[in-house]
Amino acid sequence: TSNNNDGTCYNLASQDAVGKIDGADEFDATGDLIDLGTSTSLDVFGPNQDFSVFLWVKRDSTGGVEGFFSSGSSGDNGIYFGSSSQNTDDMRFMSKSNTVNIQSTNGAIGDTEWHYVGVTADRDGNLTLWADGAVAHSQSIAGTSGENWNRSDDTYKIGTDRSESNPFNGILDEVRVSNIVRSQEWILTNYRNQSDPATFY
């Protein structure tokens, strides 16, 4: 992309797995991750800054806590987007210092099939979790609009949590980080087009 954010892979099972779109990265939960570095173009989590994070995920199992996208070295130093510890069939987003801690409640990722998942944050409105083009959960975060959730230390990471203690097990594809709130129409169109182009056409 125009920002040229090239990740550095560590211990990946494969960088040429069969993905949802084309080739993808396979993780086996043995300390593997993609380190995206510290580019300021990824600092989209600042005060009053809207953002979106979307990706395709195919889990090998649904029994564990697994980070999809994170930043910083701990809960006090960055964000977390991944599965929930309360119910690993659900997604969870936690802000820096965990002032926002929101999870879905409908088992949105409770199997080992491909799912198009994401989070959108209107910092003056709602944070919404998405699964396969539909809202999985939405909750107001307006009271935290002035907080800075950009990382305090460490890097941006794909395939693990903030402390790198809950690595992902499965395949990830098409990770996108945006400095705007993607619309429901954009999200549903991306899901339908990428999931089954022939049917979409």
Image (cartoon, rainbow, N blue to C red):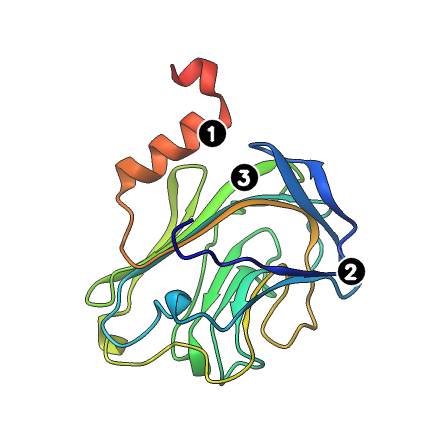
Q: Residue 127 appears in which quarter of the rendering?
A: bottom left
Q: Residue at x 57, y 82 (%)?
A: 74
Which callout, 2 or 3, points to the residue nearer the camera? 2
Residue 106 in picture, x, y percent from top left: 48, 47
Packing grade of label 1 (10 A; few <14, some 14-19, many >=20) is some
Q: Residue at x 21, y 63 (%)?
A: 125
Of callouts 2 and 3, which one flags the residue occurring earlier in the amino acid sequence?
Answer: 2
Residue receiving disc 1: 194
Which callout, 2 or 1, points to the residue nearer the camera? 2
User: What amino acid is labelled 1 in the image?
Assistant: Gln
Q: CA distance from mark 3 to mark 1?
A: 11 Å
Q: CA distance from mark 2 to mark 3?
A: 24 Å
Q: Is residue 140 above or below residue 28?
A: below
Question: Which mark identifies residue 11?
Answer: 2
Residue 118 in picture, x, y percent from top left: 44, 50
Q: Quadrant of the C terminus?
A: top left
User: What amino acid is labelled 3 in the image?
Assistant: His
Residue receiving disc 3: 115
Q: Residue 177 appears in which quarter of the rendering?
A: bottom left
User: What amino acid is labelled 2 in the image?
Assistant: Asn
Numbered label tally: 3
Of callouts 3 and 1, which one flags the residue occurring earlier in the amino acid sequence?
Answer: 3
